[in-house]
Image (cartoon, rainbow, N blue to C red):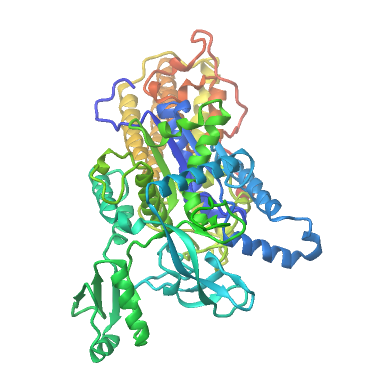
């Protein structure tokens, strides 16, 4: 890029983008699209323009396994009776996989590969990757076989997995609305025995706990290494502070919180704990016992349970379960007498993007073993777009398993500075009408395909990116879905889309109509004015910096400012030219404005790709416009034949960025 004087961010030579995987028992709702996929797709498209399309891989796919899918399939069979007899569990999940892929296409979300963890070649490779990772961790001593308690429904005669049990999170101060067998809705991890008031969703009765053997990754032993990782990321200042803060919360020592009333019982009973430090802060409603190890904490829990003294546990790292006994899952290698286990869905979904990367590389004739060049080599970067509830899994469990895979043990002397960790891009909650909505909760979210009956994909992409989910939870308030909406007021969802359908549309039409009328459809080949160059350069640099930090709301703000300034420039300068009836002045305004519109098009391309490409077609320019290598070059750089170049003629009231018919009423 020529002419830029300010320092600019350095991007990797190659990049992998991932988006959180939707479960294979549902379609996509507004949160999937507006909270993760549009952001991931926009960044992937930007990087393709910025570092070259062959240097970017964007993968995602359907999360095909897990107890929620089994429970959903059972409910489906119960509700549909004989008409569902021919639908197998595989058919059920594969149908949702195809539906998800179709809906992503309607939003211009275009992964290099939208795969699945169970089907086709990606499913085969995912099983291979799962086996290889297990064997690597086992061989190097990073797995241990633990006999732990698992919920068992005596009425149904089955062990219960994951979300087949609901209760209350045991963590002090947790605000989640639901907790499951060993995790709550906010991602807190605990042992099943800690869940408060458990209920089986199969029988609606309290399950019992029975001992089962499973494989666990020694996550709790990686506390020190994860601290070093957080320190490294704080120095780099690329990972959002909220992510680092959440990560650090889980790196605390094991703790138990006892209310002051219950603490009186502890004192009366003369209870003493091994290797514990009592922290008593006067203004707090509870006292804290901090322990040196999980074993010490669990011994204390046993003492309190025996004396029926109530308590809550604190956030800390616990062994990360890898296996379970669900029949529908990726098989775990039979090892040390543990047979017929399957991988728990959460860990295998963490390495699924690597499976998908290998699948994609193979599909384009590359060596699947080259996945490391895309994920962990020095000159690449993996960006993982997730929701904030999943930081524990991606920011802690995945990072520790990556260290283990690379040979960094819990006590390794090697510095984590040498590890190129994936960069998490975690968005805050996308609310619906000021409440947290989920398909399994009381407030049902609108489905992604429903929204397209009321808004265009461009309007929705612009709106979701503008919400600032990197900073705070924000409510999505679409007027057609709000029973309390004032229909006389403007729909807030249309605000940022109107920048394109109104302001930018008018600018483009004015440029085209003036060129058709005065210059025979030829853009005047003149040097661009200094005023226009400075305006465009400043915006492009701000935009690039904000994209670098995945601050998408600032990107939309950059575009808003630029487009409005371009519009004002055209109106002001063209009025001067028309008042003077000076064609030379008109020529300069057109040359400047088309240049500004062209650079704006480059900036819009990752956000509204199909419409941007439509404008490019009417400008009759080649696709070098999208490359940041030429972003400050004159518009003639993108003409195949400068001497004979002409824009395409457009009819009156032509729309480059369309509205729905219903929006004109």
x then y, percent, for residue 305:
37, 83
Considering depth in this image, is 565 or 235 the residue closer to the camera?
A: 235
x then y, percent, for residue 230:
27, 50
Q: Residue furthest bottom?
A: 268
x then y, percent, for residue 503:
47, 38
Can you see residue 484? no
Can you see residue 216? yes
Res 561 quadrant in image? top left
Taking 399 as reference, is 431 left or right?
Answer: right
Residue shown at 55% from the left, 40% from the top: 109
The quarter of the rendered structure image containing the N terminus is top left
Q: Residue furthest front?
A: 337
Q: In this picture, is 484 found above or below 592?
A: below
Q: In this picture, is 203 found above or below 414?
A: below
Taking 254 as reference, is 66 left or right?
Answer: right
Q: How many marks?
A: 0
Q: In this picture, is 74 found above or below 137?
A: below
Q: Residue furthest right?
A: 82
x then y, percent, for residue 93:
65, 52
Considering depth in this image, is 115 or 512 the residue closer to the camera?
A: 115
Considering depth in this image, is 593 or 612 the residue closer to the camera?
A: 612
Residue shown at 28% from the left, 31% from the top: 8
């Amino acid at each position: 890029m020529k002419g830029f004087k300010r320092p600019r961010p350095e991007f990797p030579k190659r990049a992998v983008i991932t988006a959180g995987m939707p479960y294979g028992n549902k379609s996509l709702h507004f949160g999937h699209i507006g909270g993760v996929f549009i952001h991931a797709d926009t960044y992937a498209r930007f990087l393709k323009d910025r570092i070259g399309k062959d240097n970017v891989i964007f993968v995602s796919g359907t999360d095909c396994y897990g107890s929620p899918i089994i429970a959903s399939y059972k409910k489906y069979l119960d509700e549909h009776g004989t008409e569902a007899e021919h639908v197998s569990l595989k058919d059920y999940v594969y149908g949702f996989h195809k539906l998800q892929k179709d809906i992503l296409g309607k939003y211009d979300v275009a992964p290099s590969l939208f795969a699945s963890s169970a089907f086709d070649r990606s499913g085969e490779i995912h099983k291979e990757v799962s086996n290889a990772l297990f064997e690597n961790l086992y061989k190097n001593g990073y797995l241990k076989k633990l006999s732990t308690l698992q919920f068992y429904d005596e009425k149904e005669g089955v062990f219960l997995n994951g979300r087949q049990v609901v209760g209350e999170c045991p963590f002090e101060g947790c605000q989640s609305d639901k907790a499951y067998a060993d995790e709550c809705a906010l991602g807190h991890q605990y042992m099943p025995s800690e869940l408060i008031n458990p209920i089986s969703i199969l029988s609606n009765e309290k399950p019992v706990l029975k001992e089962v053997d499973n494989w666990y990754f020694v996550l709790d032993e990686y506390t020190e290494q994860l601290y070093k990782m957080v320190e490294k990321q704080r120095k780099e200042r690329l990972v959002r502070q909220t992510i680092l803060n959440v990560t650090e919360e889980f790196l605390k020592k094991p703790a138990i919180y006892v209310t002051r009333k219950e603490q009186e019982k502890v004192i009366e009973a003369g209870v003493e704990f091994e290797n514990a430090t009592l922290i008593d802060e006067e203004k707090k409603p509870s006292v804290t016992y901090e322990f040196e190890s999980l074993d010490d904490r669990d011994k204390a829990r046993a003492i309190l349970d025996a004396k029926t003294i109530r308590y809550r546990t604190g956030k800390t790292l616990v062994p990360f379960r890898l296996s379970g006994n669900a029949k529908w899952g990726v098989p775990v290698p039979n090892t040390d007498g543990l047979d017929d286990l399957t991988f728990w869905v959460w860990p295998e979904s963490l390495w699924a993007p690597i499976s998908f990367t290998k699948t994609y590389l193979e599909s384009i004739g590359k060596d699947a073993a080259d996945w490391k060049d895309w994920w962990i080599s020095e000159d690449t970067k993996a960006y993982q777009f997730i929701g904030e509830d999943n930081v524990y899994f991606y920011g802690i469990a995945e990072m520790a398993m990556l260290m283990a895979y690379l040979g960094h043990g819990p006590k390794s002397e090697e510095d984590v500075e040498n590890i190129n960790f994936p960069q998490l891009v975690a968005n805050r909650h996308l609310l619906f009408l000021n409440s947290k909505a989920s398909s399994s909760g009381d407030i049902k979210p609108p489905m992604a395909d429903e929204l397209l009956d009321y808004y265009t994909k461009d309007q929705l992409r612009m709106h979701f990116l503008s919400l600032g989910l990197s900073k705070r939870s924000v409510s999505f308030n679409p007027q057609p879905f709000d029973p309390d909406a004032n229909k006389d007021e403007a729909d807030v969802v249309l605000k940022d889309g109107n920048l394109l359908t109104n302001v930018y549309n008018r600018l483009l039409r004015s440029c085209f109509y003036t060129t058709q009328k005065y210059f025979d459809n030829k853009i005047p080949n003149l040097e661009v004015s200094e005023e226009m160059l400075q305006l465009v350069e400043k915006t492009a640099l701000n935009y690039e910096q904000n994209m670098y930090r995945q601050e998408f709301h600032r990107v939309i703000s950059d575009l808003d400012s630029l487009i409005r300034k371009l519009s004002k420039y055209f109106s002001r300068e063209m009025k001067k030219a028309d008042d003077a009836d000076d064609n030379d002045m008109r020529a300069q305004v057109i040359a400047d404005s088309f240049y500004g519109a062209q650079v704006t098009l480059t900036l819009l391309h990752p956000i509204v790709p199909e419409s941007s490409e439509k404008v490019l077609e009417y400008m009759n320019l080649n696709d070098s416009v999208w490359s940041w290598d030429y972003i400050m070059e004159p518009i003639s750089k993108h003409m195949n034949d400068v001497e004979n170049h002409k824009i395409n003629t457009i009819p009156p009231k032509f729309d480059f960025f369309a509205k729905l018919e219903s929006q004109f009423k």
